[in-house]
Amino acid sequence: MIFQLTSCAQNSKVQDSKPKNQDNTQPSYEEILPIKTGADQTELYLDLLKGKNVAIVANQTSILSILQRAEVAPNIMGSKTVTIHLVDFLYENKELNIKKVFAPEHGFRGEADAGETIKDGLDKKTNLPLISLYGNNKKPTPEQLKNIVVVVFDIQDVGARFYTYISTLHYVMEASAEAEIPVIILDRPNPNAHYIDGPVLEMEHTSFVGMHPVPVVYGMTIGEYGKMINGKKWLKNKVQCDLTVIPLANYTHDSAYSLPVKPSPNLPNDIAINLYPSLCFFEGTNVSAGRGTEMQFQIVGSPFHKLKRHLFEFTPQPNKGAKNPKNEGKICYGYDLREEKMLNKIELKWVIDFYKVIKTTRKKKNSSIRFLLN
């Protein structure tokens, strides 16, 4: 089989580190204390930015939790934890000089469709220049990095090779290395770090949805991935970046982590994120993975499935994140996967099922190849 892979895809949930204590032993400190992202640990990176011209690579997932003095009861002052965007937090710090923001696929606020061209502009809140790193300008240019002293990268990844944020990281590191500008990655948990699976990419098939010889699910945080890009000398001409990773605290690869902000428009919740590495194989076919519904990457279906009366059905329609969804306005027959157990491997049974059924159904019309090449 040959699959054409395309790029990815607010439910707010509290991050959590769930104990996996099945043998009555005492849980480790990582299982008791809340996970702290790199961005949360401001004491580890603010001094690295003071007095410098800073560029930030960020999107809607670039948030941190801080303590603020506030009224906690009538006429009683105290402290409470609030969530703030990294760009807003750093911009308000008068000791820093934030110059511009680079945005990945889906844009700075994460509202654009997969593959949609993002235009440069200004951030309405801070009036900072916004530069898109998607479309024709995937790599910061020397002009865009002019007078920048340090680059901060803070974007939530989901641990799948075809999710384009790691490709953006590659080009940011490469451009920064060529300009001799250090990069600081504020690390974040990988919600699919609990397993590694899938074939390693053959390098003759590299693209923006697969740049490195890694498995489909690679089991690393984005900070660890950045270190691997550097250590393996995967950047152009084998240059290496002056790289600092602000690590996670109270985290292991087995830590349960519910993303507080959806990482892209079509990955709305934990279920979709867990199913994404398995369902993204449908992207280059005529089988819908739920774009154009509110159940993206939690359902699969096609108008061509022969067992229509026995299956779950849905009709894709334009919505936020899918202006022109596959099979728009057509009833798709398939499966509702929202009650599936959490996967710890790539599950291919749904791909195999649709391949067999659609091939049989459309054999007389000689069009089953649409499932493979669309």
Image (cartoon, rainbow, N blue to C red):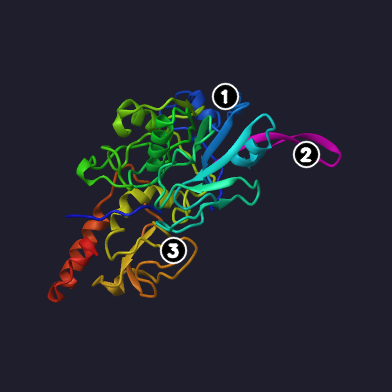
**Is 245 situated left or right of 122 in this image?**
left
**Residue 95 covered by magenta stretch:** no
Residue 363, position in %: x, y?
Answer: 14, 72
C-alpha gap between disc 2 and disc 3: 41 Å
Name which residue lies at 24% across and 65% down.
Answer: 374
User: At numbered mark 2, what does the secondary structure look like: helix, strand or loop?
Assistant: strand
Which residue was labeled with disc 1? 48
C-alpha gap between disc 1 and disc 3: 40 Å
Which one is in front in this view, the residue at disc 2 or the one at disc 3? 3
User: At numbered mark 3, what does the secondary structure look like: helix, strand or loop?
Assistant: loop
- What secondary structure is the stretch in magenta mostly built from? strand
**Residue 74 covered by magenta stretch:** yes
Which residue was labeled with disc 3? 322
Q: Amino acid at mark 1?
A: Leu
Q: Amino acid at mark 2?
A: Val
Dot 2 or dot 3, earlier in sequence: 2
Q: Which residues are magenta?
A: 62-81
| In the rendered image, the vertical position of residue 50 relative to residue 371, given as above or below | above
C-alpha gap between disc 1 and disc 2: 33 Å
Dot 1 or dot 3, earlier in sequence: 1
